[in-house]
Image: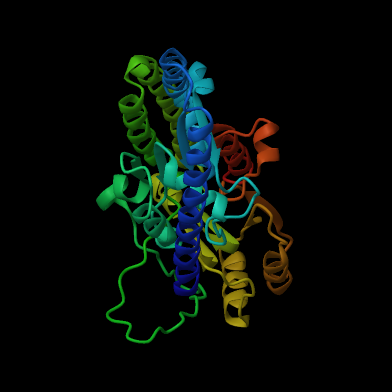
Amino acid sequence: MFTKRIGIISLIFAMAASVMTGCGSDNNSSSEKAAVVSSSSASTATEEDNTADTKTNSEKISVVCTIFPEYDWVKQILGDHADNVELTYLLDNGVDLHSYQPTAEDIVKISTCDLFIYVGGESDEWADDALAEATNKNMKVVELMDVLGDSAKEEEIKEGMQAEEEEEEEGEGEEEPEYDEHIWLSLKNAKVLSAAIESKLAELDPSNASDYKANLDSYTAKLDELDKSFKELVDKAPVKTLVFGDRFPFRYFADDYGLDYYAAFVGCSAETEASFETVAFLAGKIKDLDCKTIFTLENSDKSIAETVINTSGKDVEIAELNSLQSVSKDDVSDGATYLSLMQKNYDVLSGVLK
């Protein structure tokens, strides 16, 4: 994480230098143009000023989001006003939050946008440096972890879970708690975070604020409906423990409905190979709990889950839950939304928790 942040800082300084060079060139060009048009009439200059004003007034609000849930929440709140906004989803190539490296183009978009929305956990430390160098000093910012405040949960190392090896940094002081960043997987959190986004959009575009509030209310009702469905499903289920042969980013979700879990790694782990001890522990849980299903995340190669199954000696199916961390622009084009993907998770669980 330290190396990643140094890289981003270097990128920001390099961009600043290039912008200054570009400005110098533009100034020279402007001087030459001024000499050519110096004989133009005052009326022509006035026409050009009016045109410039019209262009400024017609400029779209620029909103930049890091992850898919933020992007989709903005779309749902905008509703019919989406054409009035230039909306950017930075992670649209399908890379997840923990692996994302912003490009120079990404930094420029952030630096000049009207509203920047990001998670704000350890994986987003680069964003603080980008915001410090932003050229739009009137930019509004929604940091999801900050909005959640004391409701944010520290990462949990469960029994049998393989802890991630930490890199030691020179001069490192007392270790600060690491918070679970996957706050969007709670439908209850989604309501709070969507409301924070709606508030900022209303500030940027007060003439359409009533529409944004109405859209938020309608969307909140849909979140409540799916939340109720999950609660009823889990309340009736005889099975309330999930076994993951993968990372576990669903802590907020599990806590919402009183689910227990065992997993190979924490949600933010970069580990990809489970130790013998972890595999043996999960295989033991499969047998002890008489599990018929072991879970993986989207895009998993399922190798850990398959090893756990083989070690357990039981006939166990593999089911996939979507953490909404790697939604691509193609998925968006195919109609993926926050609610549709969470509904798919409901459909998967409804076939297991019975």
Residue 279 quadrant: bottom right
Residue 281 lies, with reference to residue 42, above or below; the image says below
User: As rendered, which of 298 and 87 lies closer to the eye?
Assistant: 87
Residue 352 lies, with reference to residue 14, above or below; the image says above
Q: Residue 319 at x, y = what percent?
A: 67, 51
Residue 55 lies, with reference to residue 23, above or below; the image says above
Regarding residue 66, the answer to whether it shows in the image is no
Residue 94 lies, with reference to residue 285, above or below; the image says above
Q: Residue 184 at x, y = what percent?
A: 45, 45
Taking 234 as reference, is 91 left or right? right
Colour basis = rainbow
Looking at the image, the residue that sits furthest to the bottom is 170
Looking at the image, the residue that sits furthest to the front is 39
Residue 247 quadrant: bottom right
User: As rendered, which of 233 and 334 lies closer to the eye?
Assistant: 334
Q: Residue 285 at x, y = what percent?
A: 56, 68
Q: Residue 178 at x, y = what percent?
A: 36, 66
Regarding residue 312, the answer to whether it shows in the image is yes
Q: Residue at x 47, y 15 (%)?
A: 44
User: As rendered, which of 268 and 143 lies closer to the eye?
Assistant: 143
Q: Residue at x 72, y 67 (%)?
A: 303
Q: How many marks?
A: 0
User: As rendered, which of 9 and 5 lies closer to the eye?
Assistant: 9
Which quarter of the figure is the C terminus placed in? Answer: top right
Q: Residue at x 43, y 24 (%)?
A: 56
Taking 353 as reference, is 202 left or right? left
